[in-house]
């Protein structure tokens, strides 16, 4: 259990550090200022940044909580999958550990983002950073001519997500004493369906409130 908690802690710290590095390297504050300048006065913008700096610690505190919620929900979905599709019992603790291990692959996303905008697309706006998702379907079709409710599903279709599935499949196949193919089926029937439901929900709310 200690190793699993350590993974959770390291993942949370890494996410916070990478977020801060991204904000500094890509001058996120300056981009946000330029974006807000089109809608607010200088005084309003100053108040906004003061408020943001005052409560910045809250965003740091939320990260480990969000990681815990996300990974626990995914582990729960996988637990249901192994319960129905595996003859070998797999504990929730094991599955949570697998999910936390797989989550580290997503740390490459901000790294790719920093490299891309720092070395290649050096002329960018706030929207470019927000919509950019490396190695995703969205980068192929572009976000400018895409309906807002299609943005998230196109972001979700990416190579990091594929790697995430494969890592989970490997560990589940090993834990169930079967194969990676069997593990992939369990991942698809449990996490895959949960992810599909989540994407559809995001699309629904985006369509209705955009």
Image: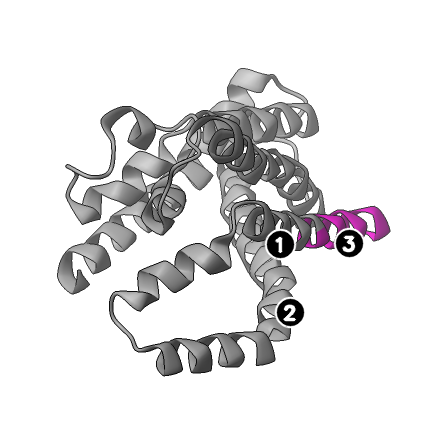
Judged by depth in the image, the label closer to the viewer, 2 or 3, is 2
* Residue 9, magenta (yes or no): yes
Real-space Cα separation, disc 1 to disc 2, in angstroms: 14 Å
Q: Is mark 1 on a helix, strand or loop?
A: helix
Q: In this image, 130 relative to 175: left or right?
A: left
Q: In this image, 49 relative to 22: left or right?
A: left
How is this picture coloured?
Answer: one colour
In the picture, residue 189 is in which quadrant?
A: top left
- On the image, numbered disc 1 is attached to which residue? 20
In the rendered structure, find residue 61 and report the number of the disc placed on it: 2
Q: Is mark 3 on a helix, strand or loop?
A: helix
Vertically, is 175 above or below 52? Answer: above
| Pick the front one: 52 or 167 | 52
- The secondary structure that dominates the magenta segment is helix
Q: In this image, 136 relative to 209: left or right?
A: right
- On the image, numbered disc 3 is attached to which residue? 5
In the picture, residue 138 is in which quadrant?
A: top left
Judged by depth in the image, the label closer to the viewer, 1 or 2, is 1
Return the x and y of residue 123 as percentages of the image width and height.
Answer: 38, 37
| Pick the front one: 186 or 26 | 26
Return the x and y of residue 127 as percentages of the image width and height.
Answer: 32, 48
Real-space Cα separation, disc 3 to disc 1, in angstroms: 23 Å
Residue shown at 44%/39% (left/top)? 190
Return the x and y of residue 115 as percentages of the image width and height.
Answer: 55, 31
């Amino acid at each position: 259990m200690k190793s699993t908690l350590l993974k959770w802690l390291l993942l949370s710290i890494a996410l916070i550090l990478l977020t801060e590095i991204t904000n500094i390297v890509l001058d996120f504050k300056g981009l946000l200022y330029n974006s807000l300048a089109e809608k607010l006065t200088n005084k309003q913008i100053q108040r906004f940044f003061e408020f943001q700096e005052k409560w910045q610690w809250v965003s740091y505190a939320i990260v480990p909580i969000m990681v815990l919620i996300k990974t626990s929900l995914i582990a729960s979905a996988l637990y249901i999958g192994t319960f129905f599709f595996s003859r070998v019992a797999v504990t929730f603790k094991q599955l949570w550990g697998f999910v936390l291990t797989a989550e580290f692959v997503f740390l490459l996303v901000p790294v790719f983002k920093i490299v891309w905008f720092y070395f290649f697309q050096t002329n960018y706006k706030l929207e470019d950073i927000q919509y950019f998702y490396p190695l995703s379907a969205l980068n192929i079709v572009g976000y400018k001519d895409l309906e807002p409710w299609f943005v998230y599903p196109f972001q979700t279709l990416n190579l990091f997500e594929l790697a995430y599935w494969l890592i989970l499949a490997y560990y589940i196949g090993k834990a169930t004493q079967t194969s990676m193919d069997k593990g992939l089926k369990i991942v698809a029937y449990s996490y895959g369906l949960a992810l599909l439901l989540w994407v559809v929900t995001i699309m629904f709310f985006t369509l209705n409130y955009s």
